[in-house]
Image (cartoon, coloured by chain):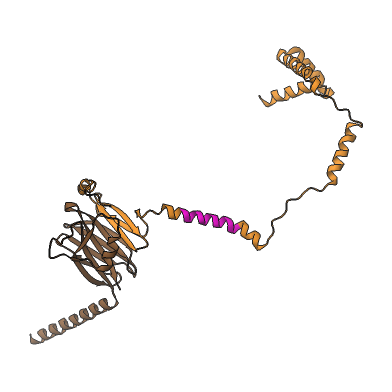
Amino acid sequence: MKEQEQDLVLKVQAFVDGELPEPEQAGIAALIARDADVAALVKELKQTRQALAGYDEAVALPESREFYWSRIQRELARFPREQPEPVRGSLGALLLRWLLPATCVAALVAVGFLFLQSPWSAGGEVTWQAANDNVNAFTYRDYEEGLTVMWLSYPSDNTVADSAEAATLN
Amino acid sequence: MMLMHVRHAVLLGLAALVCGVGAVVASEDGQRFEATLVWGTNDAELPGSALKPVPPPVARKLAKLPFKWAHYYAVECKEFALDKGQRTKVQMSRECEITVKAVDDETVELALRGQGQPVGKVTQKLVGDELLVTGGNAENFTAWFVVLRRLQ
């Protein structure tokens, strides 16, 4: 629904409820008279109002509306608003604010490093430059033993190496 | 004429002296390495008298590798010294030649040639008793390895 239409619906609703300001009432009444859709809306709103009449009991205020709301305003002003507690500048607060996230990040990095660092990898401290495209190299790094294996394979011997009998690894 | 011969002799002597001093400096201040060409096999018996046991520090580490070969034999084992930035060629077998360069105090560069053709070049830090091993499949389901280590 467009904003203009929504505004019209609200005005019609206010008209039906008797809450539309007097200067606008004549215009809406004329619109209802000449526009069948608006007239249908008025009819529907009235039917709905009648259907809900039993559930919408009017509350009778003992004083005028203005006086009633001024009392509520005074009560609201009497109680100071709760301000959010400022973050203390203590060491503990600083630790919580900065050290905790930093620790979490460091832990994530460490876990990632442990799990992503496969012993069979191409990289790390080892660099390999193949003399031609026919040579494939895999790097095995055993950090504990201090050992780097650069396993070189050629297409010509892959058929042999890939056979079950000739498998390279245990 | 005689004077010229004497001058040549003196010059050659000086050159030899300079080269000799240089060689001594290289061996004293240079970095010492050992390169071993290893053959990996499942045959327990040494098929040839030329094969030797692999140096113990190398054998211990090779045995821990997850390879299928149960036995490792040294085809050739050579020691050499390099100054920082210096490189040398080492013939490991008729078909295998390596060129080793001491890039700096820790890093080495190992270039491989097989059957006269360049295979590739690996560069890495090699400190303490670390090993740099290159290897590949060989005939009859065996394997070859070139093991480079620093001698202390």
Residue at screen point 34% across, 53% down: A120
Q: Please identify the residue farthest to the front as the structure is shown.
A: B44
Residue A109 falls inside the magenta stretch = yes
**Picture mark count:** 0
Residue B66 position, x and y percent, is 30, 55
Which chain is displayed in orange in the rendered image? A
Nearer the observer, A69 or A51: A51
| Residue A107, percent from left and from top | 51, 56
Front residue of this view, candidates B7 and A76? A76
Looking at the image, residue B69 lies above or below residue A58: below
Residue B58 occupies which quadrant of the picture? bottom left
In the rendered structure, the answer to whether residue A5 lies left or right of residue A152 reads right
Task: Name the image quarter holding residue B122.
Answer: bottom left
* Span colored in magenta: A98-111
A35 lies left or right of A102: right
Figure colour of chain B = brown
Residue A154 point in image, percent of width and height = 23, 50
Residue A55 visible in rendering: yes
- Report the residue at 16% width, 64% height from top: B51
Q: Which SS does the magenta portion mostly show?
A: helix
Up-down: is B55 above or below A162? below
Which of the 4 image quadrants contains residue B88? bottom left
**Is residue B83 shown in magenta?**
no
Quarter of the image that includes the N terminus of chain A = top right
- Viewer can see residue B148: no
Image location of residue A92, percent across then percent down: 65, 61
Front residue of A15 and A72: A72
Q: In this view, does A22 lie above or below A94?
A: above
Query: Vertically, is B119 above or below B87?
Result: above
